[in-house]
Amino acid sequence: MTVPFRARPPKETTPVGRFRAPRTDHHADDTACPPEHRHTTSGKPLTPGCPGRAYSKAECSCGEWSVKHAAKGYVDDARRQHLSTAH
Ligand SMILES: [Zn+2]
Ligand SMILES: [Zn+2]
């Protein structure tokens, strides 16, 4: 069996950055609150139909880690720490 030849192999990545854990924001009913949904600095929704961000979560692409918290700063800190210390 022959393996199809790849003209351009995928770029070699550095050990740091192999995994991703993007933060996603959610409404209280678990639906996504996408970045298009604008909020005031105090968290009040400015987008019609948006009930407001209830919590944020991040799930690492390693599949072994996730975090869920009401404060998005907490989620950002936790995922940064995971990405820099785990794997
Ligand atoms: Zn929203
Ligand atoms: Zn991970």
Image (cartoon, grey):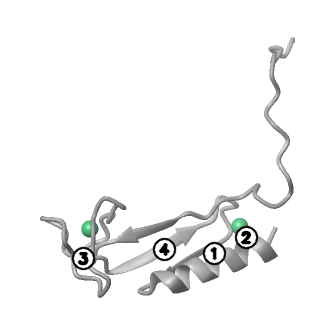
Q: Amino acid at mark 3?
A: Gly
Marks 2/4 in contact by CB < 8 Å: the verdict is no
Quick one: SS at disc 2?
Answer: helix
Crowd tier of the residue under label 4, counting other residues whose Cα lies within 10 Å: few below 14, some 14–19, many 20 or above: many
The disc label shown at residue 87, or none: none
Which quadrant does the C terminus fall into?
Answer: bottom right
Task: Specify which label sits upstream in the sequence, 3 or 1.
Answer: 3
Q: Residues within 10 Å of mark 3 (few under 14, many from 20)?
A: some
- The amino acid type of the residue labelled 2 equals Leu
Q: Which residue is mark 4?
A: 57
Query: In this image, 29 relative to 17: left or right?
Result: left
Q: Write the residue at 24% across / 76% down.
A: 52
Mark 1, residue position: 79
Residue behind label 3 places its C-beta within 8 angstroms of ligand 1:
yes
Q: Are marks 1 and 2 in contact (CB under 8 Å)?
A: yes
Residue annotated with mark 3 = 52
Which is nearer the N-term, disc 4 or disc 3? 3
Q: Secondary structure at mark 1?
A: helix
Left or right: where 24 falls relative to 40:
right
Residue 83 is marked as: 2
The structure residue drawn at horizontal position 32% and vertical position 83%, both measured from the top left corner, is 41
Alpha carbon of mark 1 to alpha carbon of mark 2: how far? 6 Å
Tell me the mark number nearer the camera, choosing from 4 and 3.
3
